[in-house]
Amino acid sequence: MAVPARGADTQPAPARGSTPAVSATGTKANASVASPPKTVAAAPSGPQPAQHAGTRSASATGTTATARAAAAPATLDLKSLEQRLRDTKAIGVFTKLSLKIQVDDLLADMKAFHGGRSLPPLPELRQSYESLLLKVVTVLQNGDPQLASAVSASRDSIWTLLSDPKKFSEIT
């Protein structure tokens, strides 16, 4: 009797009434006709983030994208943003005055733009707006992180108000 070489396929021939099934590695294995083949889950490709003991993945906890979106800070309207900025203790009086002057200048430029004056052009106004919001978020980050997060989350909705002539005319 011959001894099979090491690593050679040593699977016995399939029994009568069974069919060979191909495993995830491409080798044949015996599977009974009466039982369905087992599904082998493919391993995820790429590096996976390490989990700490005591933490669960989002699918294990039942967290969905909608639940995470609901937990994100809500966008602020201009009136509530203005009030929260006035009330916060994270910004000093002189910084608040400086920011108010910059906001007023931006609003004046936006009003002139919507009035037909094309200088500065809208991309430059957007850059000024983004710069101003970055200053506000930076100042708030350590002293009032919730407000900083709300301002960041409101960035696009506020710009939509400012850049739309009809919506802008309603707020000024």
Image (spheres, rainbow, N blue to C red):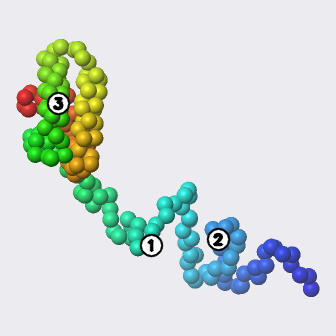
Looking at the picture, does residue 118 appear above or below residue 68? above
Q: Position of residue 164 (x, y in %)?
A: 17, 29
The amino acid on which the numbered mark 2 sits, given as a three-letter code, is Ser
Q: Position of residue 32 (x, y in %)?
A: 62, 82
The label nearer to you, 2 versus 1, is: 1
Nearer to me, 128 or 85: 85
Q: Which of marks 2 and 1 is nearer the N terminus?
A: 2
The amino acid on which the numbered mark 1 sits, given as a three-letter code, is Ala
Q: What element carries label 3?
A: helix
The amino acid on which the numbered mark 3 sits, given as a three-letter code, is Ser
Real-space CA distance between mark 1 and mark 3, rounded to the nearest whole angstrom: 48 Å
Q: In this view, does 170 lie to the left or right of 152?
A: left
Q: What element carries label 2?
A: loop
Q: Quadrant of the N terminus?
A: bottom right
Q: Position of residue 130 (x, y in %)?
A: 27, 32
Q: In this view, does 71 lie to the left or right of 40?
A: left
Q: Earlier in the sequence, mark 1 or mark 3?
A: 1
**Quarter of the image where one finds residue 19:** bottom right
Report crowding for label 2: few under 14, some 14 to 19, many 20 or more residues within 10 A (C-alpha): some
Residue under the point 66% across and 70% down? 22
The label nearer to you, 2 versus 3, is: 3
Q: Which residue lies under the disc numbered 1?
A: 53
Nearer to me, 170 or 111: 111
Residue under the point 68% across and 76% down? 29
Nearer to me, 162 or 133: 133
Q: Can residue 99 be seen in this view?
A: yes
Q: Which residue lies under the disc numbered 3?
A: 98
Q: Which of marks 2 and 3 is nearer the N terminus?
A: 2
Real-space CA distance between mark 2 and mark 1, rounded to the nearest whole angstrom: 32 Å
Q: Which residue lies under the disc numbered 2?
A: 23
Residue under the point 22% across and 14% down? 118
